[in-house]
Image (cartoon, grey):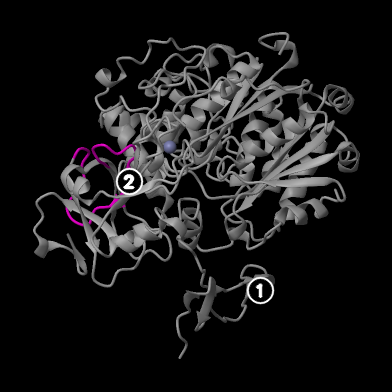
């Protein structure tokens, strides 16, 4: 698509307010040989009911329909895995459906769940996502992931998804990063930050105390990207309970937190980057009509949009999501983000797509220190901290669960329950992980609103999930 | 001795010959740290898929003959009439009319340029390309889209002029039959089975 019709630019509308009342997740790891997927889903579900101080059976009694995110059937060699999980959770004979949109599967599952409640079809639904990528050796895993590229035109080229993806990173690196050593170090900082935050997260798979030099010395995967620039391959599950207002109030009666308003919007773009055609940049509410007229002059080669350097799917998810929830400037209106840091460089690309910085200036979000819990330059709270969970680089990428994990993590801050959930000694012990002696409370103080971006591969599917404390909506009528 | 699965089409039906899968036994997975208790089992499997190229078949057939085919929308009623697509698109993405197949070998030889690239040290299982793999995305004059492929010789750079080479001997009938080399590469340097 090159031009939009008016109908296509309709601001999405929920027919009634929708709430996130609770969420939960399992431990995440590269392999979990001691548990079946259903055991991980039960772990996530019982955590969600525990968060409300009610039993699993009580929570189940409110659920009316179920939305299951699980991307890669071929990893588990099980079609209709959704039916297995649904039965093991004892939710038959309620209606359920599987959702699969690659890396965005978790976000898309929430998208479906929110629409089901908004429409009135259900008053309370379960969104549950999972993935297990430990059922084949790593090289076969790479083969299976490469099946998410076009099977005739891309996959035979090495059967390595990184290759199809990283060409975009190269273009961004050279055009907008100007192949500068300083930009390469900025990318490394993202990995240092996310692995570092993962140290405070008992759920996280890859806690690491590393330096920029360690990242720059890690093995090259596809230059300029190195092993420590890349996200994890994971096993795990995450879930969320989405309700209308009446059910939300009822379910939170004895809970230590209030229900949060939730909006989800989605965008897409070609599976093959090869098929991308030129278009005008769709503008976010914080951008001006003439803003990008000199982009090609400032960054020679950057005049083609979205070219191979922007994710139009992410831009559209933000375009719809911001208007839907009343966000005019993400940096001012939101208090934290969870972004889809599949690679350090795609994290930077996303800052621009979602308007945290203008196109061409994504690196400034890191270099200014705004993306940190505590700005390392000023020692003050970061303006808009991102990926305090550790993200996909430090916490996990159990594909179908990822977008739900991110949403859960954002919610824990707005609920002011981050420290309680991530600091609990019992949980560290149960996961067989050692709580670091220098464990630090990463609660974003006074968080009222946040957003999670869930993103598939080269950007074929992207969702934006916006959460707000209902007492701090941007616009009352939203 | 087993025979690779072979397929041909006759009377609109697939006709199959040979072995399409191989049997390997399940093996138990046990815990070395816990008295070798049973944890699970391996499930080996090899299968052969039967895949149609449908309307893209002419593209893959032409590679082995040294031709690069693209497509163009010639629909008078289409707002984007005249758009040229490489990758080959069977239908126009705007009007959904059937595109016209065009031979763009000459355009490729004259105007192909590296739009972006990536040198990849890793591969997945079943890869048959030499590593590192040099992925390149190629832009052409007058073509709306940018093709992904691989560079067989030299080191890629953005803006570099390249020319297509085709696996005319023993074609695989896959996208691997098309590759690229820097402009000016002599024919004698081309990889085995490839020619201009
Ligand atoms: Zn057309």
Tell me which label, 2 or 1, sits earlier in the chain: 1
Up the image or down, A40 lies above or below B7; here it is above
- Residue A352 among those drawn in magenta: no
**Which element type, helix, strand or loop, lies under badge 2?**
strand
Where in the figure is residue B107, as x and y percent of width and height? 21, 45
**Which element type, helix, strand or loop, lies under badge 1?**
loop
Which residue is at a point 43% across and 39% down the rendered structure image?
A343
Which residue is at a point 58% across and 46% down the rendered structure image?
A399
Where in the figure is residue B48, as x and y percent of width and height? 51, 72
Q: Chain of mark 1?
A: B
* Residue identifier under label 1: B36
Which-is-in-front pick, marks 2 and 1?
A: 2
Q: Are marks 2 and 1 on the same chain?
A: yes
Which residue is at a point 62% across and 19% down the rendered structure image?
A11
Observer-nearest residue: A263 or A182? A263
Mark 2 beta carbon near ligand 1 (under 8 Å): no
Where in the figure is residue A239, as x and y percent of width and height? 72, 40
Do labels 2 and 1 touch, CB within 8 Å? Answer: no
Where in the figure is residue A163, as x and y percent of width and height? 37, 49
* Residue identifier under label 2: B147
Q: Give the spatial CA distance, label 2 vs label 1.
A: 52 Å
User: Which residues make up the magenta segment?
Assistant: B139-159
């Amino acid at each position: 698509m090159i031009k939009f019709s008016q109908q296509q630019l309709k601001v999405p509308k929920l027919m009634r307010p929708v709430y996130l009342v609770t969420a939960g997740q399992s431990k995440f790891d590269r392999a979990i040989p001691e548990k079946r997927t259903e055991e991980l889903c039960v772990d996530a579900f019982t955590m969600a009911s525990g968060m409300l101080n009610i039993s699993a059976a009580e929570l189940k009694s409110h659920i009316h329909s179920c939305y299951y995110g699980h991307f890669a059937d071929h990893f588990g060699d099980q079609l209709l895995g959704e039916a297995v999980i649904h039965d093991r959770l004892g939710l038959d004979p309620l209606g359920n459906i599987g959702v699969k949109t690659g890396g965005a599967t978790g976000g898309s599952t929430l998208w479906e769940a929110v629409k089901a409640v908004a429409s009135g079809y259900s008053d309370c639904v379960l969104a549950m996502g999972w993935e297990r990528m430990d059922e084949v050796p790593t090289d076969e895993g790479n083969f299976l992931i490469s099946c998410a590229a076009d099977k005739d035109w891309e996959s035979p080229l090495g059967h390595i998804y990184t290759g199809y993806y990283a060409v975009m990173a190269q273009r961004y690196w050279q055009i907008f990063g100007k192949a500068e050593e300083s930009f390469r170090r900025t990318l490394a900082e993202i990995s240092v930050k996310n692995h570092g935050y993962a140290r405070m997260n008992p759920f996280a798979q890859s806690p690491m105390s590393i330096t920029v030099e360690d990242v720059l010395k890690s093995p090259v995967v596809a230059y300029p990207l190195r092993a420590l620039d890349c996200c994890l391959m994971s096993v795990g599950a995450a879930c969320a309970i989405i309700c209308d207002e009446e059910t939300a109030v009822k379910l939170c009666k004895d809970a230590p937190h209030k229900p949060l308003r939730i909006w989800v919007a989605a965008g897409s773009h070609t599976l093959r980057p090869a098929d991308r055609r030129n278009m005008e940049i769709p503008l976010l509410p914080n951008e001006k009509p003439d803003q990008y007229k000199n982009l090609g002059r400032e960054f020679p080669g950057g005049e083609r949009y979205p070219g191979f350097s922007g994710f139009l799917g992410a831009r559209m998810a933000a375009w719809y999501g911001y208007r839907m929830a009343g966000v005019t400037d993400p940096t001012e209106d939101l208090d934290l983000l969870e972004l889809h840091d599949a690679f350090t460089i795609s994290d930077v690309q996303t800052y621009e797509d979602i308007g945290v910085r203008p196109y061409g200036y994504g690196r400034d979000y890191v270099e200014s220190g705004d993306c940190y819990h505590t700005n390392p330059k000023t020692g003050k709270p970061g303006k808009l901290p991102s990926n305090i969970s550790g993200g996909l680089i430090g916490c996990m990428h159990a594909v179908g669960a990822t977008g739900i994990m991110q949403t859960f993590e954002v919610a824990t801050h707005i609920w002011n329950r981050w420290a309680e959930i991530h600091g609990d000694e019992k949980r560290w012990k149960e996961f067989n992980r050692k709580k670091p002696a220098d464990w630090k409370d990463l609660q974003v103080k006074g968080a009222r609103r946040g957003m999670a971006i869930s993103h598939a591969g080269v950007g074929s599917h992207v969702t934006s999930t916006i959460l707000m404390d209902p007492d701090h909506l941007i616009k009352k009528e939203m | 001795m087993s025979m690779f699965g072979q397929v041909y089409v006759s009377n609109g039906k697939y006709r199959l010959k040979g072995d399409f899968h191989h049997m390997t036994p399940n093996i138990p997975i046990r815990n070395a740290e816990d008295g070798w208790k049973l944890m699970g089992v391996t499930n080996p499997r090899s299968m052969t898929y039967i895949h149609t190229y449908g309307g893209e078949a002419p593209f893959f057939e032409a590679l082995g003959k040294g031709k690069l085919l693209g497509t163009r929308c010639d629909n008078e009623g289409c707002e984007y009439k005249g758009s040229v697509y490489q990758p080959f698109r069977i239908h126009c993405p705007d009007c959904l009319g059937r595109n016209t197949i065009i031979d763009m070998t000459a355009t490729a030889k004259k105007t192909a340029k590296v739009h972006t690239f990536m040198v990849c040290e890793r591969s997945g299982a079943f890869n048959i390309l030499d590593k590192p793999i040099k992925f390149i995305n190629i832009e052409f004059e007058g073509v709306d889209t940018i093709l992904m492929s691989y560079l067989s010789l030299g080191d890629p750079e953005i803006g570099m002029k390249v020319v297509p080479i085709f696996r005319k001997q023993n074609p695989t009938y896959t996208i691997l039959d098309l590759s690229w080399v820097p402009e000016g590469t002599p024919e004698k340097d081309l990889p085995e089975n490839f020619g201009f």
